[in-house]
Amino acid sequence: MLIDSRSPAWLLFGQIILLSAYMIAGWKVLWRALLKLRKLDFTNEYFLMSIATLGAIFLQEFSEAVAVMVFYTIGEFLQYKAVNRSRDSISKLIDLRPDEAHVVQKNEITTLPIEEVHPGDIILIKPGERIPLDGTIVKGKTTLDMSAITGESRPVRVNPDMDVLSGSISRDSIQIQVTSPSHESTVTRILNAVENATANKSQTEMFITRFARIYTPFVLVGSLLLAVIPPFLFQQPMEIWIYRALVILVISCPCALVVSIPLVYFSGIGKSSHEGILLKGANVIDSMTNISAVLWDKTGTLTEGSFRVISIIPADGYSEKDVLATAALAEAHSTHPIAISIREAYGDELDLSKIEEYEELPALGIKMRTSSGDQIIVGNDKMVHHINCPHSECIDADTAVYVVKNSVNIGWIIIDDQIKKDSFLAIKNLKSIGVQNIAMLTGDTKKVAERVGDELGIIQENIYANLNPINKLEILEKYIHESSNKGSVFFIGDGVNDAPVIARADVGIAMGGIGSDATIEAADLVIMDDNPSKLGKAIDIAKRTHAIAKQNIIMALSIKAFFIIMGAMGLASMWVAVFGDVGVTILAILNSLRLLR
C-alpha cells in the first residue's frame, strides 16, 4: 500500500526531518544569538538570522528556514577558509624561529632551547639550518637565504665579523656569537609586530563597526514596520508581509562587511610581511593612502652609512699610492670612521714602528713624525690654513682629507658616504605616484647634503643640513602644520637619534636591518632589508588594500539595497535572499583575497 505524502503523519515526519536539519546546521547561530541577547546586544547577524528562520518556521516554511541556516553555515565555512588562507602568509613566519640552538661549550656541542641561550654564547649553525638568534659570525663564511626576513630573493654572502639575522638560512656551517636574547631577536620582533598589527583597527573597520550598530537596529525596526503597517492600515494579508519582512532580515545580514573588511586589511598586512615590510597596524594602511610629504634621513637611509674613499688626487710629483700610504700611517691609531675608511682603502699591513710622535688636533686632524724624521699632518681645509700650508685648491667639506708632508701638500683624499643605488628608485617611485614634497634631513654639512640631494633629485630648499635631533623634530612639526588636512607626513630614518622624529610623524618608518631597537620600536612601519624603494611597494599595497575595502562596501551595500527593494515588493523569496546574502559575502571575500596574489 502506498503512503500518501500529504497525510498528517507523513507531513509531521517531514517537518521533524527538516527541524533536525535546521538544528544541526543552525544550533551555533542560535546559541550565539542567545549569548548576545543575554548582553542585550541586538546588533549582530546571529540575531537577524535567528529571527528570520524562526519566523519562517512559524509560517510553516520549514525548507526555507533550513536553507537559510545551511547556506549561512556554508558561507561561514568559506569565510573561515578565506581567513585561514590570509593568515597562512603570516603564520608561516612561525617557522622562521627554530626552537633550539647548538651551543658550543668547551669543544662540546649542546642543544638547548633558544630561551636558555644568552648573549655572548657561541652557537653552531649547520648547513641548511635557520639561524635561531641574531649574532656575529666568529668562524666560517657562508651564503644566507634572507628571503623570509627581508623579501630579498638573492642570496647574501657573509664573512667573519659580519652580523647575521635570525630566521636566515645558512648554506654552509658557521659559528656565531649571540648578540640578542630570544625575546629581542629579529624573528621575535617580526612575529610580535605582526601579531599585534590587527589590534590597531583601520578607520574603515571602525566605520563598519559603528555602521553595523546603527544599520542592524534600523533593519529590525524597518522589517517590523513592514510586517505590521500594511496588514493593519491597508487590511493586507499578514502572512505575506511577515514573510517579506523575514526575507529582508536575511538579505540585510551585515556579515559580508563585518567579515570582508577586516579580512582585506589582514591580507594587506600579510602581503606586506611577505615583501619584508612590517606594518604595525591596519590604521597605518589608511594613513599611507593620502601622502602630503615624505622626509628622509640621509646617513644609513638614503646612503650606505659607511665612509669610503671615493678618489685620490695627488699633487705634482706624487702618486695616489704615496698619498694613500702616508695618510694611512698617520691614521693608524685613530678610531674615526674616516680614518678607518682610509686604512681599509690602503689594505696593506702598516708598520707602526715608523711612528715616533703622534698628536690629534681637535677639529683639524692628526699630526705625527716618522722614524725617518718626516713631519706628516693629515686633516681638513681648516688644518692647512691653520699651519699656513700652501695648497692649490680649498675643499671646504668634512669628507676632504689633505695630506701634508714636511709642510708640502702632497694631495687630497676625497671620502664620502655612498648613495644607495636603491635610493634613486625610491625617489623616482614617490614622484611617479604624485608625491612632490620630498625633503632630506641630515646632521652632515650643507655641501655634503646638497651633493646627495642634487644627485637624488631633491630640490635645494627641501634639503636641511647641520641638524641635531631637536632640529629634525622642529622641521617635522613645520611640515605637519603645513600639511594639516592635506595628508600624512612620512619620516624615514634608521639611527637612535631618529626615534623621536619617527614617533612624532604621521607615519614613522624605520630601516630594520641597521636601525636601532629604539627606532624600530617607535616606527609604524619597518623595512627589513633597508632598501628605500620598499616604501613605494608599501604605499602600493596600502592603496590597493584601501581600494578593495571601498569596493567591498559599495558592492555589498548596492547588492543588498537591490535585494531589499525586491523583497519589499514581494519579488524575492527567502531562497533568493539567502543566495543573495551568501553570494555577496563570497564575492567580497574573493575580492579581499586578491591582495595575496
Image: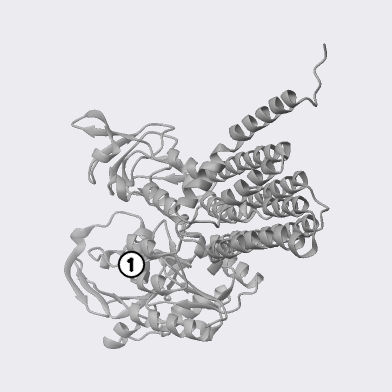
Q: Is any atom of residue 147 visible in this view?
A: no
The residue shown at (45%, 54%) is 39
Residue located farthest toward the left when viewing the structure as drawn: 357
Does dot 1 land on a helix, a strand or a loop?
A: helix
- Asked if 406 appears above or below 24 in the picture, the reply is below
Instruction: Give the image location of residue 91, x and y in percent.
Output: 48, 42
Instruction: Give the image location of residue 394, x and y in percent.
Output: 41, 85
Q: Could you say which quadrant of the image residue 541 lies in?
A: bottom right
- Please rate how many residues cluster around mark 1, counting C-alpha atoms within 10 Å: few if below 14, some from 14 to 19, many from 20: some
Q: Which residue is mark 1?
A: 496
Q: Is any atom of residue 61 visible in this view?
A: yes
Residue 215 placement, left or right of 575:
left
Instruction: Give the image location of residue 6, x and y in percent.
Output: 80, 27
The residue shown at (22%, 45%) is 120
Instruction: Give the image location of residue 367, x and y in percent.
Output: 22, 75
The residue shown at (49%, 61%) is 201
Q: Which residue is more in the foreground, 448 or 458?
A: 458
The colour mode here is: one colour
Q: Could you say which quadrant of the image residue 494 lies in?
A: bottom left
Residue 295 placement, left or right of 224:
left
Q: Which residue is more in the foreground, 201 or 546?
A: 201
- Asked if 62 appears above or below 390 in the picture, the reply is above
Q: Which residue is more in the foreground, 516 or 576?
A: 576
Residue 132 placement, left or right of 505:
left
Residue type indicated by callout 1: Val
The quadrant of the rendering that contains the N terminus is: top right
